[in-house]
Image (cartoon, helix red, strand yellow):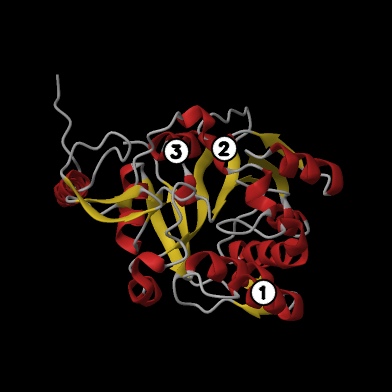
């Protein structure tokens, strides 16, 4: 019996070297954010929630004490989309802004030669998804709020399923899955990433829009930073911790940048109102500003909000 010999020993050595590097990088990361046993420290408290930092990977998060099965229905009720505070004063009023946001992301994806089937996670009424559809994508969405999902199906003529990504099942395989400001909201983030991996075609992409807690703005405002809004937001990422999370789940970072994102001032004022101390006449002041300037649109400054594009790697 003749023993096979590698025709190119140098190539084998390179493969071993790269595998070794990848292995030690993998060992440095937390392999489960939900069941992490590494030591953790308390960063601060907000709304009676303890904000924790992992001593190993630096991930910042809260531990959900309530029943996770009821978490989505409690947090993302209709009040989240219409009562302001940490949510929206009126989500439906942002229709035009969000459709245009979807168009911009669809155009961005064309630079990476990707098109086809898309699943938008946490798609709400489907406005961003509509922007992709207008650029030729075959669109589907999943949204935990029934009112928003029904609006998207009825008014936007989109295929939207009510539920969470953690429990979402489909016989479809997607070319692109989008997580536009939802990565921080998953109650079981490891399950969510595992599901994304299984739902994507080989080499499929994940587009993430997320807040950067290591940004100058986040550091400047500290615990008053608008994104510190537990229990709606559960996870807070840096560039490195987000990359580590996806790397553990066998994704590779392709590119990142700052989105050209518009917001209306009514929404911005609602966030500011919820994060500023009480003072005499505060409600009247904000009501006046919202009435006077709320319909105006401005571009969000490219400071603490970023987009990231990850590619599904082949299983080892």
Q: Which residue is mark 3?
A: 187
Q: Measured along the vertical axis of the image, is residue 113 above or below residue 302?
A: above
For disc 2, the neighbor class at 10 Å (few under 14, some 14 to 19, many from 20) is few
Mark 3 vs mark 2, CA separation in Å: 12 Å
> Looking at the image, is mark 3 or mark 2 nearer the viewer?
2
Image location (x, y in percent) of residue 46: 37, 55
Mark 3 or 1, nearer chain start: 3
Image location (x, y in percent) of residue 134: 78, 58
Q: Nearer the viewer, residue 311 or 180?
A: 180
> Looking at the image, is mark 1 or mark 2 nearer the viewer?
1
Residue 261 seen anywhere in this rendered image of the structure: no
Can you tell which quarter of the image residue 89 is in? bottom right
For disc 1, the neighbor class at 10 Å (few under 14, some 14 to 19, many from 20) is few
Q: Nearer the viewer, residue 292 or 249?
A: 292
Could you say which disc has been placed on residue 284 in the image?
1
Q: Residue furthest front?
A: 280
Q: Measured along the vertical axis of the image, is residue 35 above or below residue 83?
A: above
Mark 1 or 2, nearer chain start: 2
Q: Measured along the vertical axis of the image, is residue 105 above or below residue 151?
A: below
Q: Nearer the viewer, residue 117 or 163?
A: 163
Helix, strand or loop status at disc 3 = loop
> Looking at the image, is mark 3 or mark 1 nearer the viewer?
1
């Amino acid at each position: 019996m003749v023993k096979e010999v590698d025709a190119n020993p140098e190539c084998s050595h390179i493969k071993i070297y790269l595998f070794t590097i990848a292995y030690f990088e993998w060992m440095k990361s937390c392999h489960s954010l939900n069941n992490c046993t590494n030591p953790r420290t308390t960063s601060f408290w907000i709304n009676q929630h303890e904000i924790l930092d992992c001593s190993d990977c630096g991930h910042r998060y809260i531990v959900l004490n309530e029943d996770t099965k009821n978490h989505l229905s409690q947090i993302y009720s209709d009040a989240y989309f219409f009562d302001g505070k940490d949510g929206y004063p009126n989500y439906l009023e942002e229709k035009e802004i969000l459709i245009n946001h979807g168009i911009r992301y669809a155009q961005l994806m064309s630079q990476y030669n990707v098109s086809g089937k898309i699943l938008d996670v946490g798609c709400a009424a489907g406005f961003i998804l509509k922007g992709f559809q207008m650029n030729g994508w075959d669109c589907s969405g999943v949204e935990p709020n029934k009112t928003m999902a029904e609006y998207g199906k009825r008014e936007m003529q989109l295929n939207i399923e009510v539920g969470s990504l953690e429990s979402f099942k489909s016989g479809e395989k997607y070319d692109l899955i989008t997580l536009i400001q939802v990565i921080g909201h998953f109650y079981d983030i490891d399950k969510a990433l595992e599901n994304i991996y299984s739902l994507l075609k080989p080499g499929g992409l994940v587009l993430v829009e997320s807040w950067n807690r290591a940004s100058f703005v986040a550091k400047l405002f500290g615990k008053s930073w608008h994104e510190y809004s537990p229990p709606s937001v559960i996870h807070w990422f840096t560039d490195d911790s987000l990359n580590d999370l996806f790397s553990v789940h066998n994704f590779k970072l392709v590119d990142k940048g700052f989105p050209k994102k518009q917001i209306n001032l009514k929404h911005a004022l609602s966030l500011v109102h919820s994060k500023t101390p009480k003072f005499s006449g505060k409600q009247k002041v904000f009501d006046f500003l919202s009435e006077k300037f709320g319909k105006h649109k401005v571009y969000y400054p490219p400071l603490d909000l970023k987009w990231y594009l990850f590619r599904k790697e082949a299983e080892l």
